[in-house]
Amino acid sequence: MKIKGFTEGFGGEITDLDLAKEGTLESAQAVQDAMDHFGVAVIRDQRITDQQQIAFSRLFGQLEFSPHFGRGDKDLVRMKFPELFDVSNLDEHDNILPDTDRRRVYRAANLMWHADSTFQPHGAGYSLLSARIVPASGADTQFADMRAAYDALSASMRERIEGMVVEHSTFYSRSLVGYQFTEEELKRRTATRQFLVQTHPRSGRRSLMVGSHASHVVGLPVEEGRALLKELGEFATQERFVYTHKWRVGDLLLWDNRCTMHRATPFDDTAERRDLRRTTVVGDLPLVPA
């Protein structure tokens, strides 16, 4: 296995690895070591099955289950395994979602900067996204290096935000795009609290945790806290901190949610099909008791 960095320290391509044949604990450990440095990595030309993606992802730890699976929701009927999250514009018959489908609104939140599952008690570790169908143009995914962003903050800002706690909620992030939750959906999750500054459990590097799920800063007036989160988010997503991934069919893209943010970019999703499937490893973020 080899890795070539896209920049000095953020994003890279792993080569000479065929996960259909070599998805072993040894290969996962090598990938993990590379991820500690690069934060984001792509393994090209991986024509893997859902089962192979799940099996390789499990080598990194316990996987999240979709909250929709087995509940009768239409959202993930396409996915036959609870470990898979549907990142597509397709319905249960693999047709493009009509404009009236509420799943369009829900998935529109993916266009905002975020880290996966910060609204879950322990957040997310790695996310692994497999490209099965990609549009002819657009639909890139952008990543921001939250470690480099933290390092670039002024000393006074680092001192100001040290120890701050932020409440994260999927209800807040989806409300920003106008999604209306059902009573059943509202019962499934509650808000969680995470430290604004995180220390990575493996690399020891410090990073920011902001993004669309970050509702407010605990202990500050809501508008003051949101202004601070907006300021930090805009600082962290400057071009100098961002890697843009241009998808190819067969890409398996990995990123570490403990030190990155990401967002989807638009494409003509009423005319072109997109089918990406995500597995997500349960994280180990320092949880602040409610």
Image: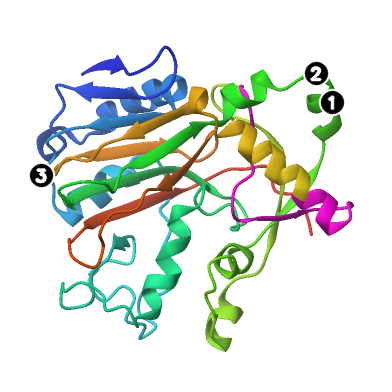
Separation of residues labelled 3 and 2 (CA atoms) = 46 Å
Q: Is 179 left, or right, of 68 in this rendering?
A: right
Residue type pointed to by label 1 = Glu
Q: Residue drawn 40% across and 79% down?
A: 102
Query: Callout 3, which amino acid?
Result: Arg
- Name the residue that disc number 3 marks: 47
Q: Residues within 10 Å of mark 2 (few under 14, many from 20)?
A: few
Task: Identify the image quadrant of the N terminus.
Answer: top left
Q: Secondary structure at mark 1?
A: helix
Above or below, 69 relative to 162: below
Of tags 3 and 2, the one toward the viewer is 2
**Residue 155 disc label:** 2
Spatial CA distance of label 2 from label 1 is: 6 Å
Rendered location of residue 159, percent (x, y): 84, 26
Q: Which residue is mark 1?
A: 159
Give the number of the disc on residue 167. none
CB atoms at circles 1 and 3 under 8 Å apart? Answer: no
The amino acid marked with disc number 2 is Ala
Alpha carbons under labels 1 and 3: distance apart: 47 Å
Residue 36 at least partly seen: yes
Q: Total number of numbered labels?
A: 3
